[in-house]
Image (cartoon, rainbow, N blue to C red):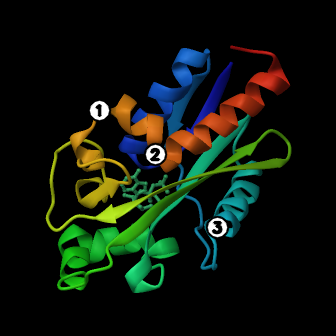
Amino acid sequence: MRITFITSNPGKLREAMAYLTPLGVEVQGLKFPYPEIQADTLEEVAAYGVEWLSERIDGPFFLDDSGLFIEALQGFPGVYSAYVFKTLGIDGILKLMEGVEDRRAYFKSVVAYWDGEVHIFTGTVHGRIGLERRGSGGFGFDPIFIPEGYGRTFAEMTTEEKNRISHRGRAFEAFSNWLRDKLKIG
Ligand code: ITT
């Protein structure tokens, strides 16, 4: 089965393919800008995006809205992660975290799938913000995120390794289990 992944982020597409292709799902990336509304939760942003796209895209598709939530910053950048990544960037986050002892943070990913109605799958991974950037893999905030129980950042892991424990990997796990059940595939 072929499903379109609406994203402008090649890192997300790579992770989706590594996860879903072995299950027999052909993922086709499509850059199709959609409105990301200002809302308090990733779920609301994702659901609005899917409804909007459903009138413009043929066939089943999904999108992924994700964010980094830093405890000491009351969940910032959260739903504003894409904007903050483009403006403050990793260096800006490290600056905001200078001298901050509580470095706990989590990533959350919301995958919203459309097949005539909206289906939402979520995944979270807890960890901490490193003191400096490390690694060249992954994308986005990966060089400063160290998942719980690990001494390495996501950027120091392979795609497969990151997928096994990441927010997106967990959301895809839920999504693919649901797909398998529904379509009797894989
Ligand atoms: P889309 O076109 O798919 O929306 P995007 O990069 O704009 O791509 P989001 O709107 O979901 O994605 O914004 C999430 C931000 O958080 C973005 O800057 C990402 O780089 C970052 N991010 C999301 N998932 C991440 C991950 O697994 N590792 C590191 N950073 C991540």
Q: Position of residue 105 (x, y in %)?
A: 41, 68
Please say if 111 is above or below 27.
Answer: below
Element on which disc 3 rests: helix
Location of residue 163 with respect to 32 vertically, above or below? above
The residue where tag 1 is placed is: 158
Q: CA distance from mark 3 to mark 1?
A: 29 Å
125 or 30, nearer to the observer: 125
Q: Are marks 3 and 1 in contact (CB under 8 Å)?
A: no
Residue linked to disc 2:
166
Image quadrant containing the C terminus? top right
Label of residue 45 in the image = 3
Q: Nearer the viewer, mark 3 or mark 1?
A: 1
Q: CA distance from mark 2 to mark 1?
A: 12 Å
Query: Does the closest atom of ligand 1 sit within 8 Å of the Cβ of label 2?
Result: yes
Q: SS at mark 2?
A: loop
Ranked by sequence position, the earlier of labels 2 and 1 is 1
Q: Amino acid at mark 3?
A: Val
Spot occupied by residue 59 in the image (x, y as percentages of width and height): 74, 33
